[in-house]
Image (spheres, rainbow, N blue to C red):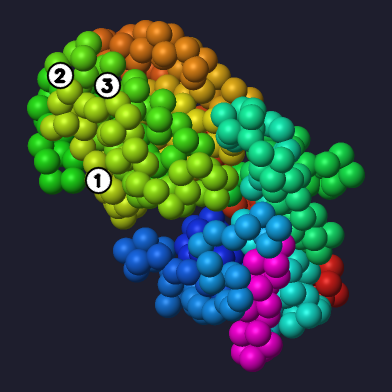
Amino acid sequence: MGQDPLSILCIEPHFPGRLGATADWLVRKRGYRCRFYANTPEAREHWPAAVGQGLDLRVFGVGGVAREPAVAWSRTLERSLCHAYGCWEVLDADRPRPIDVVVGRSAGLGSSLFAPVAQPAAPVVNLFDYYLDPHHNDLAADDGPGASPIYTHWRRSAAAVELLDLENAALAWTPTHWQRSLFPAEYREDLWVCHDGIDGRRFDRARRDGPRTVAGRTIPASSRIVTFVARSLDRVRGFDRFWNLARALMKARSDVVCVVVGDPVVRRGLDVTFHGRDYRAVMMERAPLDDVDRLLFLGKTPPETVAEVLSASDLHVALGRPYPVARSVLEAMAAGCVVLASDSPPYREVLDDGRTGLLVEPDDPDAVLRAALSAVDDPAAHRPLGEAAAERTRERYDQDVCLPRLADRLEELANSRNGR
């Protein structure tokens, strides 16, 4: 007789966050029952289809400094503990049963830290995105030199909750080998590498000739569409570099149209300089555009619009700092885009220069412009790069490739704990 599908508890500060798509797949494809605990849900248009059909969302509140959008560096751990306590309070009140496995993503906020108190029999699987180094990666090279000692103190201590989560996990999981390499050697070998994948069904890989439609606007077939997609427009994802490239491209070619998707307000706490500010407005003031009508800002859009943008793109730009590769880069690859990305370790793990994309030194604006012009000057010649990128996502990064591996590990853990 076959075993019943697992009942899992997912915990993440935001919903759908990173785990929402994973939970959706596990419910749809494996028949799991999922309770998802989150503090901050996005608008319903961003929710996965399985909500209410096997995926049940439960919102928990937080108190103390956890209610503040940003805190002093010395209160970072306190903020995380408030998040963990807020989740535990609701778990303890609900006492959901049965729970075979807890799947958590603290995202630096420790939300799943106290789950074993409420669910002592359920093994904890924690997804780890990033381990902050005091002196390297993300914006350390931009903001570190000349910064006050407080900046370094914060960077040195900010990973404390990740260390607690590592100790708390029956299985520590991270999406890429580069991400695993960031963690202390004492934990690195125990980190299991498995990408959580993207939903390739949403992307039209057939690159059609003729006019294209983006967010209700028809763009002529003769135009060259250059895209940038991020959760929010910030320096970590390279929006400043994209902006400078867009200005240069629009000067060099009158047929270039740039399309930007993302919240203009910097939400990422790593960017201590611009956090909470409208970064689009900052760049507009620092480097005004000559033709604002050829740079379309769509803001934060639903997944269907992102897919539409990427399917129309002639060149997708991802000139981010050393940081985990955004899901939007993999989605651009799945859509058959030619991707122009930073020549740095996280991007090299995903893209091969000249085979599945274009890699360039992001701080060399002349080299960036040459690479971008080569792609928009002759899209047909570069189309094989996009086709190869789409094939790579099908083979390595599609949910239907990645998530069966995760499901097998979850079931293995549940069976070992339950004596199945």
Q: Which residues are drawn in magenta?
A: 77-96
- The quarter in which the C terminus is drawn is bottom right
Name the residue beneath numbered marker 2: 255
Q: Can residue 199 be seen in the rendering of this structure? A: no
The residue depicted at 42 percent of the width and 77 percent of the height is: 52
User: Element at badge 2?
Assistant: loop
165 relative position to 27: left or right: right
The residue depicted at 54 percent of the width and 71 percent of the height is: 67
Q: Quadrant of residue 346?
A: top right
Q: Are marks 2 and 3 in contact (CB under 8 Å)?
A: no
Residue 92 on the magenta segment: yes
The residue depicted at 51 percent of the width and 49 percent of the height is: 268
Q: Which mark is residue 298?
A: 1
Residue 294 on the magenta segment: no
Kindly report the distance in space between the C-alpha atoms of the residues bearing marks 2 and 3: 13 Å
Q: Quadrant of residue 51?
A: bottom left
Judged by depth in the image, the label closer to the viewer, 3 or 1, is: 3
Kindly report the distance in space between the C-alpha atoms of the residues bearing marks 3 and 1: 18 Å
Mark 1, Cα crowd under 10 Å, few <14 / some 14-19 / many 20+, is some
Furthest residue in direction right, as rendered: 186
User: Element at badge 3?
Assistant: helix
- Seen in the picture, residue 27 relative to 407 is either above or below; the reply is below
Name the residue beneath numbered marker 3: 247
- Where residue 287 appears, x then y in whole percent? 30, 26
**Which amino acid type corresponds to the residue marked 1 in the rendered image?**
Leu
Mark 3, Cα crowd under 10 Å, few <14 / some 14-19 / many 20+, is some
Tell which of 83 and 105 is nearer to you: 83
